[in-house]
Amino acid sequence: RHNLTSFDHRKEQDRKKAVDLISSRDSMYIQDFFKPHYIHSLVENHHLDEALANKYKGVFTSAVKKRIITHTINNPDRAVSRIINNLEEVLTDDNIASVVGWDVEKVSSIFTLPVKKHFAVININNPLKGCLKWVQGSRTMSAQLKPRKSRKSRKAA
């Protein structure tokens, strides 16, 4: 079940965000936001074709929903719209290639959907700037997007 209990209450920052969230929204809104149908309806409101709608439904995991609801307390629905816009219009292979100075083939092989999702969510205001900083090495990627070693290679190390 995904609701406020998924917050790490040991962290002061999460505690403050939870209090701000509860005071700014009613509890039904918060519970509905974490239900799958809520995000699906927002994706469908963007009038995406079925293939794209299914692609973006997978973007809004519990962790992403938690980030949206805690970082955009005033308007989480607008944040969902911005993330979809970032993925659909801003983070195209051509746009990324022009910003980072790579050819489109290299961009498409490195900037896969999970990587684009990371920048669309974490750098919601300017995802291309996040991409550039990452390529330049001045920004690190979150742990879930780093390539993971297989169990065999971990045991061998």
Image: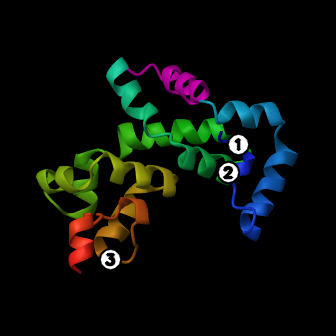
Residue span colored magenta: 36-48
Q: Is 43 included in the stretch rendered in magenta?
A: yes
SS of the residue under disc 1: loop
SS of the residue under disc 3: loop
Tell me if mark 3 has few (under 14), some (14-19) or many (20+) residues whose alpha carbon lies within 10 angstroms of its own.
few
Tell me if mark 2 has few (under 14), some (14-19) or many (20+) residues whose alpha carbon lies within 10 angstroms of its own.
few
The mark total stands at 3
Q: Position of residue 77 (x, y in %)?
A: 63, 35
Q: Is 106 included in the stretch rendered in magenta?
A: no
Residue that mark 1 sits on: 3
Name the colour scheme.
Answer: rainbow
Amino acid carrying label 1: it is Asn
Residue that mark 2 sits on: 6
Which comes before the other along the chain, label 1 or label 3? 1
Residue that mark 3 sits on: 137
Identify the residue at horizontal 70%, vertical 30% (top origin): 32
Identify the residue at horizontal 20%, vertical 63% (top origin): 101
Amino acid carrying label 3: it is Gly
- C-beta proximity under 8 Å, tags 2 and 1: yes
Q: Is residue 50 left or right of residue 85?
A: left
Q: Position of residue 10 (x, y in %)?
A: 74, 68
Q: Nearer the viewer, mark 2 or mark 3?
A: 2
Label 1, label 3: how far apart the Cα atoms are: 35 Å
Which comes before the other along the chain, label 2 or label 3? 2
